[in-house]
Image (cartoon, rainbow, N blue to C red):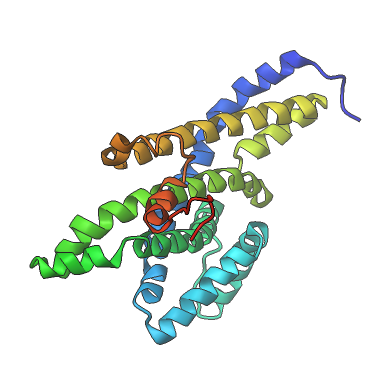
Amino acid sequence: MGAKFDITNVFEYFVKLLPFIQISLLIVAGSILVGLGVGFLVALPRLYRIPVLQRISQVYASFFRGTPILIQLFLFYYGLPEILKAVNIDVSRISVMYFVILTYGLHSAAYVSEGIRAAVTAVDRGQIEAAYSAGMTGFQAFTRIVFPQALAVAIPILGNVIIATLKDTSLAFTLGVMELTSKAQSLGQLNRHFIESYIALALIYLLMSLVLEQIFLAIERRLLRHESRDGVFEKIPLGRKWLKRRFASNIRLDKGGSGV
């Protein structure tokens, strides 16, 4: 049984947990860098419909999206060194942090690849053909036409991936990483005030998630500033503006109000 609830411990633990935010953010930053690079490579075969590589990328995305991140952590930390031993590669001295970042990076890459694919395919093909007819090269069409619009679509998706990765870092303690969740557990064990330590932990995760959400919302509004004159997109929730922009032109209502 835990000790009697004391609200003052929540504030005390909150302050003590703050220095460990940098560990969680380090995991998130490293994971997203890996995820962006790998996710781009995984998305390419599906965008260009490369037969064999397309199937491999689908299997990759299915595995990392269909299995729990905790199982993936165990597989990479305990299984990968054993596999590498078979080819005389010893990674037993490598810090556990590298295994954690690698696992989270490959995990987030599966979602990043889907986001990239959705963002690129959301750009109207007619605009690309118009760019070609205007004399643009493939690179110019991508950088001037496709990329700016795809980036506006991808930002909400990337924001969701980063926030989800931030929350998933709470499982890194299972491998002995002293991050926020691990520190919160150790604080609770000192005097049996577990509830207070977990409330403080929840508040920190909530605040970080809200800050990240507002940052990505501001970036999305910045990218869509040229559409603000219509007054349509201002109140649309994060991640839905591009859906309205993409499909609004194809929707027509009859006099009775039903779609035609």
Q: Is residue 98 above or below residue 55?
A: above
Q: Position of residue 131 (x, y in %)?
A: 16, 64
Q: Is residue 216 left or right of residue 110?
A: left
Q: Which is more toward the observer, 101 or 255?
A: 255
Q: Which is more toward the observer, 104 or 140?
A: 140
* Residue for point 61% across, 27% down: 17
* Residue for point 60% across, 29% down: 204
- Residue lying furthest top in this view? 8
Q: Which is more toward the observer, 13 or 123?
A: 123
Q: Which is more toward the observer, 150 or 203?
A: 150
Q: From where the camera sits, is residue 50 visible?
A: yes
* Residue for point 83% across, 27% down: 192
* Residue for point 63% across, 28% down: 203
- Residue lying furthest front in this view? 255
Quadrant of the drawing holding the N terminus: top right
Q: Position of residue 231 (x, y in %)?
A: 36, 34
Q: Is residue 171 above or below residue 55?
A: above
